Image: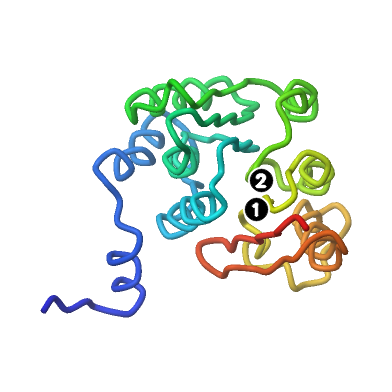
Amino acid sequence: MKTYPDLDTYRKELFAPEDDLLKEIMPDAVEQGLPRISVSPESGKMLYFLAKSIGARKILEFGALAGYSGIWLARALPDTGRFITLEIHPKHAEVTRKNYEAAGLSGIAEVRVGDAHTLVTGAAAEAPFDLVFIDADKESYPDYLDFALEHTRQGGLIVADNTNGFGHVHEALDESDGRRAIRVYNDRVANHSGLVSNIIPIGGWLTVSLVL
C-alpha cells in the first residue's frame, strides 16, 4: 500500500489528481508572462464536483487567467452544455482559448474579452445560469454578486474564489484595500435570505452559495 509524506499530499493525490494537460497549463502560462495565481487542483476538483452535483448545463465564469478553472468546470458539462468566461486581458484570453482547444472543449467553452462590467450585458441575455464562478478582480466581487443573484437559477450555485482575502479577510481592512470587497462579499452571502452559504477552506477558500 502506497504511503504519503503527509495528509495534505494524500488528500490531493487521491482526490484531485491532474491529467497531463492540467499539470502543464500554469507552468506554460507563467512562461508566457501570466501570473501564477490559478485555483489549486483541489479547488478545481471541487468546482467540477459542484457543477456535476447540480447537473449544470450552463456556467458563467468571471476571470479566465489561463483557463485552468474553466477546464475543470467545462468538463463537468454535457456535450450540449455552455461555458462562458469573461476575461479583461487579451493575452490571457488567447492562452485560455488555446487551452480550451487542447482540452477538446472549443465546442462548448467560449472566452469573451473586455471589462466584465460591460460584458455582463451580453451574458445576461443567456441567463439563467446554473453556476456562476467569480474569480476576477477582487474589488468588483460585490458587483459580480449583484449580477449572479439576478441571473442564477433557483437551485443553482454562486461560487467565489480567494475568499480568505489572501489570509487577511478576518482583519479590519482599510476601505482602500481591495481585499475589503471580499469581506463585503462574504458578509452579504452569509446573511442573504435568498442564499444558503458556506466556505470550503481549500486553496484560497471557496465561498459557495445555494440559490433558494
Checking the image for residue 159, the label placed there is: 1
Q: Quadrant of the N terminus?
A: bottom left
- Indicate the position of residue 40 as horizontal and vertical percent values: 45, 55
Residue identifier under label 2: 134
Residue in view at x 51 percent, y 52 percent: 47
Report the mark closest to the observer, 2 or 1: 1
- Left or right: where 199 falls relative to 151: left
Residue in view at x 66 percent, y 61 percent: 207
Please determine whether, in this image, residue 176 is positioned above or below residue 67: below
- Left or right: where 60 falls relative to 152: left
- Indicate the position of residue 186 as horizontal and vertical percent values: 77, 63
Q: Amino acid at mark 2?
A: Ile
Report the Cα–Cα distance between label 2 and label 1: 6 Å
CB atoms at circles 2 and 1 under 8 Å apart? yes
Please determine whether, in this image, residue 166 is positioned above or below residue 51: below
Checking the image for residue 45, the label placed there is: none
